[in-house]
């Protein structure tokens, strides 16, 4: 993936996807079939104010977005579309009140679907995975409409 295409993807993720823009997601790395995203901490993403642990829905959003963006790297036209078909999340430990990293990797791609694997962790402790996920994303290609 050349720098021009990378910059387009970064702009789409950080400025055009409303949920990612609302959260303040930043692209750390992107290449064909892989993405690494930073989800900045915000106290509004706490699930339990007593323990200051991240809300599971925030973690699920990170899982979904990482898989979707990794899938997007295989689009062939700006008119193509990606949508989540199925997603599984295993929560391994609670997320702390700090930034998280979401990595998404494409495991298998077909003409109309992509299977992904996602991992969530804190930037300073990659070995202590917060959650892992698998996702299946549909691809609707522009030429399929012709």
Image: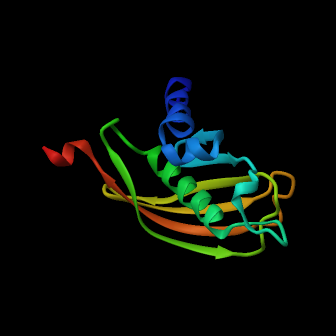
- How is the protein colored in the picture? rainbow
Q: Residue at x 49, y 66 (%)?
A: 135
Q: Answer with the quarter of the image where residue 111 lies.
A: bottom left
Residue 94 drawn at (x, y percent) = 78, 71
Query: How many marks do you count on the picture?
Result: 0
In the displayed structure, does residue 43 sit left or right of residue 113? right
Q: Nearer the viewer, residue 71 or 18?
A: 18
Quadrant of residue 77 within the rendered picture: top left
Residue drawn at (73%, 47%) of the image = 40
**Compared with residue 53, is residue 69 higher up or lower down, i.e. above or below?**
above
27 relative to 57, above or below = above
From the viewer's side, name the closer residue of 28 and 52.
52
State the quadrant of the C terminus: top left
Residue 32, x across and y down, in percent: 52, 43
Q: Is residue 135 above or below residue 3?
A: below
Q: Residue at x 27, y 47 (%)?
A: 141
**Quick check: 66 left or right of 72?**
right
Please report the residue visible at 34 percent of the width from the left and 35 percent of the height from the top: 78
Where is residue 27? Give x, y as percent. Answer: 64, 39
Residues 20 and 83: in front is 20
Which of 140/55 is in front?
Answer: 55
Q: Position of residue 54 (x, y in %)?
A: 74, 64
The residue furthest left is: 146
């Amino acid at each position: 993936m050349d720098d021009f295409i990378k910059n387009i993807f970064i702009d789409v993720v950080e400025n055009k996807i409303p949920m990612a823009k609302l959260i303040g997601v930043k692209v750390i790395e992107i290449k064909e079939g892989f993405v690494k995203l930073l989800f900045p901490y915000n106290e509004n993403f706490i699930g339990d104010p007593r323990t200051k642990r991240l809300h599971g829905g925030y973690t699920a959003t990170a899982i979904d977005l990482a898989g979707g963006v990794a899938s997007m790297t295989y689009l062939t036209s700006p008119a193509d579309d990606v949508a989540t078909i199925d997603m599984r999340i295993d929560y391994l430990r609670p997320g702390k009140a700090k930034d998280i990293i979401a990595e998404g990797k494409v495991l298998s791609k077909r003409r109309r679907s992509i299977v992904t694997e996602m991992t969530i962790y804190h930037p300073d402790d990659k070995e202590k995975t917060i959650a892992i996920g698998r996702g299946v994303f549909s691809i609707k290609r522009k030429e399929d409409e012709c």
